[in-house]
Amino acid sequence: MPRESLRSKRERATRVLEALHDLYPDAATELAFGTPFELLVATVLSAQATDVSVNAATPHLFAAYPDARAMAQATPEAIEPYIKTIGLYRNKAKNVAKLARILVAEHGGEVPNDFDALVALPGVGRKTANVVASNAFGRPGIAVDTHVGRLARRLKFTSQENPDKVELDLMKVLPEDEWIFAHHALILHGRRVCDARKPDCEACTLKADCPSAFKVAPPKKPAGRAGGNTRKRRKT
């Protein structure tokens, strides 16, 4: 197949955005937060975890430590019980305790409205920084999580696997004033329609502009044992 031009990708992206606006007109982060600090901590906790699990844990966490100054006084061991239901909780407890201390020492206890300063915090990469900068401060950005990366590749807006490179490719294709909406809407579409293992292409309103529609191979079944015995092993 001939390589698609950037102009053609942008034209497809415009139609995809129109469809996403119809589907998810109020697309926004599903993390519950009241302040930039709560959003920052919740986003750090959400790495390799579901928003549902984070939202279940943070009300008690923020009741105990409502701001950076309060959390800066806590040890990771004191934070752990509040987030024990979230994956990788021990390492995350260390990160949020440390970032709270840095916020107090270097930023007056406030979350900085500066992308580079956010990325410099423990446990904060470009995805987390984009979530905080866009949702707390309205800064245009594309937070590339697993859903955004998967849909960007299926829509052929990128061929990259590295999230930072996916972000750069999407920035070339999508208008800047749509970046915040686009990453939220793509996350919702990835969760509800374009599943990693079994996308519902038949029901997908993006299928006319998705080069991968009906082409995603189903997951391979595990090979049976030699001799044709395919019975499952008993779990131990």
Image: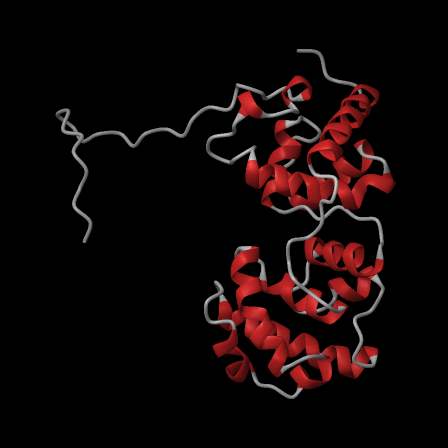
Identify which residue, 44 or 58, lies in the foreground: 58
Looking at this view, name the residue that lies furthest to the bottom: 73
Q: Does residue 49 lie above or below 208 as drawn? A: below
Foreground: 55 or 71?
A: 55
Figure coloring? secondary structure
Asked if residue 165 shows in the view, the reply is no
| Residue 15 x %, y % | 77, 24
Q: Quadrant of the C terminus?
A: bottom left
Q: Quadrant of residue 212?
A: top right
On screen, residue 182 versus residue 7, left or right, reads left
Residue 53 in the image: state x and y as whole percent.
Answer: 51, 61
Total tally of numbered discs in the picture: 0
- Residue toward you, 21 or 124: 21
Q: Quadrant of residue 25?
A: top right
Q: Is residue 76 left or right of residue 175?
A: left
| Residue at the spot 76% in from the left edge and 77% down from the top edge | 103
Residue 129 seen: yes
Residue at 77% x, 82% y is 104
x and y, in percent, of residue 171 in the image: 80, 38
Task: Check the picture and name the quadrant holding the N terminus.
Answer: top right
Residue visible at 63% across and 76% down?
Answer: 62
User: Residue 213, located in which quarter of the rendered image?
Assistant: top right
